Amino acid sequence: MNSILVKSCFIVLIAIVSMSFISKDWSSKLKTKINKTVVSTYNVDDYQINPVSINDVSEQVTKSTLTDHLYRIDSNAASVGYIYVSQAPSMKNVFDYIVLFDVNLKVLNTKVLIYREKHGKQIGTKRWLSQFFNLTTADRPTLGDNIDGISGATISATSMTTAVGDLLESLDYMKTQGQL
């Protein structure tokens, strides 16, 4: 019993230290969800989140807003991948989501972090979101083509698919410009 308590305290301490590297603009609830997703996706306990520097020209040319949304994840002095944290519109509100990439910009995980409506929550299921796994910057997800729609979540599913597609296209541009 005592070892479980020690382990739990250690995990909480690691989470607090790790979250100190996360953007100060995120709510504590969002920081906690981001931390949990990063730890489980990259299988790391100790990591740093570092913003990726985006020049003004790239920011204007790309479809996705990358500044203050795109971060490099480093653990043990090595890069383990990238995360993109943003919001997309749902029927009447917005939802927060994260896309996690390996160092070669292949999608490892996607997750809806905070969904603020009663309808459309189905886009947050691992089953639906797994359609984005393994996509690369060369891929363009299209709802109804290579991404299945969801009855009752048409707006949110379209929004998430468009957001991931725009992000992949934006990262492809950054990659071809030698900025990633």
Image (cartoon, rainbow, N blue to C red):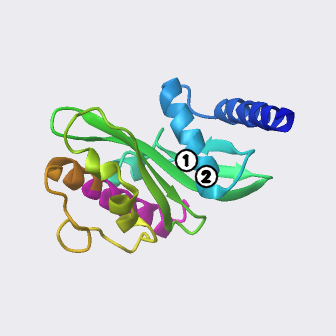
Question: In the visual, does 135 lie left or right of 7?
Answer: left
Residue 120 position within the rendered picture, expressed as x and y whole percent measured from the top left: 21, 45
Which residue is found at the position 54% from the left and 65% from the top? Answer: 178
Question: In the visual, does 20 lie left or right of 160?
Answer: right
Whether residue 175 appears in magenta in the rendering, the answer is yes
Residue 99 position within the rendered picture, expressed as x and y whole percent measured from the top left: 45, 53
Which residue is found at the position 71% from the left and 31% from the top? Answer: 12
Which residue is found at the position 22% from the left and 48% from the top? Answer: 156
Q: Nearer the viewer, residue 140 or 94?
A: 94
Quarter of the rendering occupied by the N terminus: top right
Whether residue 147 appears in magenta in the rendering, the answer is no
Q: Nearer the viewer, residue 8 or 139?
A: 8
| Secondary structure of the residue carrying numbered label 1 | helix
Quarter of the rendering occupied by the C terminus: bottom right
Q: Nearer the viewer, residue 58 or 98?
A: 98
How many marks do you count on the picture? Answer: 2
Q: Vertical placement of 169 versus 37: above or below?
A: below
In the picture, the disc for residue 37 is 1
